């Protein structure tokens, strides 16, 4: 039988359930759009994406065995398959203009994929697909929850995030050790943050680096004076702060740094 041997180091867990594959594909909606699928594997999701005439589809797959399989089994993909690493590829060469991102993503590089989304947020208006449940929950978490972290803040600054549904491990071959979940991120109307964005990212990362400490202690490694930051924010831990709180801290640090 024509198949691809699952390789653990590439995070390969092939989805068996066609109903779930269809539901994931449908999360992109019907507006005409460029679509990039990461890690098509044996094409379970790809077949539904190809069937939608509103999508201009390209797929990127790192595994040459999967690329060859797709070439043999999906003639409609001709000229649309990139045999490459999503983390290394040049996104500007993929499409003229913006594109949606979809996949049953390789879980071993979920965070790196999502950081790449953050960096390319003005080119990626919509992201949908499956991550391991814990990552999906973290992305969708709100301030005050234990799972709220760096990516929750960075992504929610620019995207509206929905946790759509949970997926059981038994619908994959081989089954992963964890449950999965499908989420959707839609670019919000914020063009840029009202602060220095590079410093904002640094403040968020530093704040969560020692997430059990108060911001007063967690931010010490920045080596910047914390004068002027409201006591309420300094006494809080990063996981309690909203995007707006981080923006406020960033602006105060920026100003004291310039004086
Ligand atoms: N979408 C398929 C496969 C999911 S497994 C399905 O649902 O069955 C994850 C897929 O991502 C695998 O095919 C794996 O080879 C691919 N992959 C892993 N790392 C990648 C990377 N850096 N760039 C592109 N594809 C990658």
Image: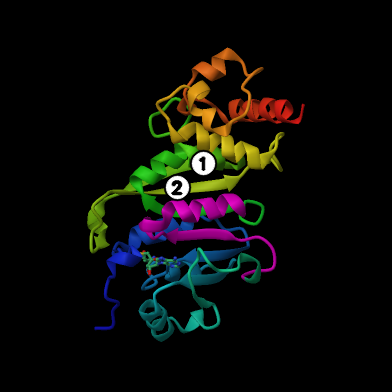
Q: Residues within 10 Å of mark 2 (few under 14, many from 20)?
A: many
C-alpha gap between disc 2 and disc 1? 7 Å
Residue ranking furthest to the front: 223
Q: Which residue is mark 2?
A: 183
Give residue 238's position: percent from left, percent from top: 49, 28
Give the quadrant of ligand 1.
Answer: bottom left
**Magenta stretch contains residue 183:** no
Q: Which residue is mark 1?
A: 161
Give residue 176's position: percent from left, percent from top: 25, 56
SS at badge 1: strand
SS at badge 2: strand
Q: Quadrant of the N terminus?
A: bottom left
Question: Between 60 and 31, which is closer to the camera in this rendering?
Answer: 60
| Span shown in magenta | 94-120
For the question of whether residue 125 can be seen, the reply is no
Q: Is residue 236 left or right of residue 15?
A: right
Residue ranking furthest to the right: 259
Q: Is residue 20 left or right of residue 54?
A: left
Write the residue at 47% across / 57% down.
26
Compared to residue 11, the image places residue 47 above or below, namely: below
Question: Between 215 and 6, which is closer to the camera in this rendering?
Answer: 215
Give residue 84's position: percent from left, percent from top: 49, 73
Marks 2 & 1, CB-CB < 8 Å contact: yes
Write the residue at 60% across / 68% down.
90
Question: Between 190 and 224, which is closer to the camera in this rendering?
Answer: 224
Q: Is residue 65 left or right of residue 77?
A: left
């Amino acid at each position: 039988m024509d198949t691809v041997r699952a390789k653990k180091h590439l995070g390969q867990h092939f989805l068996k359930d066609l109903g779930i594959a269809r539901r994931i594909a449908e999360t992109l909606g019907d507006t005409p759009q460029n679509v990039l699928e990461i890690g098509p594997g044996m094409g379970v999701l790809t077949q539904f994406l190809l069937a939608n005439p509103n999508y201009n589809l390209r797929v990127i797959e790192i595994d040459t065995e999967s690329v060859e399989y797709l070439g043999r089994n999906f003639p409609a993909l001709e000229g649309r398959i990139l045999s490459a690493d999503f983390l290394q590829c040049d996104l500007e060469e993929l499409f003229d203009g913006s594109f949606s991102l979809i996949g049953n993503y390789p879980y071993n590089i979920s965070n790196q994929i999502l950081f790449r989304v953050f960096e390319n947020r003005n080119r990626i208006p919509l992201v949908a697909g499956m991550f391991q449940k814990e990552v999906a929950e973290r992305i969708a978490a709100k301030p005050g929850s234990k799972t709220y972290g760096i990516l929750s803040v960075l992504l929610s600054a620019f995207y509206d995030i929905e946790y759509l549904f949970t997926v059981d491990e038994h619908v994959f071959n081989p089954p992963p050790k964890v449950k999965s979940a499908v989420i959707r991120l839609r670019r919000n109307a914020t063009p840029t943050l009202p602060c220095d964005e590079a410093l904002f990212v640094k403040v968020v990362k530093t704040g969560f680096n020692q997430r059990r400490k108060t911001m007063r202690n967690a931010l010490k490694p920045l080596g910047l004076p914390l004068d002027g930051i409201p006591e309420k924010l300094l006494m809080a831990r990063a996981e309690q702060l909203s995007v707006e709180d981080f923006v406020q801290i960033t602006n105060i640090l920026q100003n004291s740094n310039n004086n």
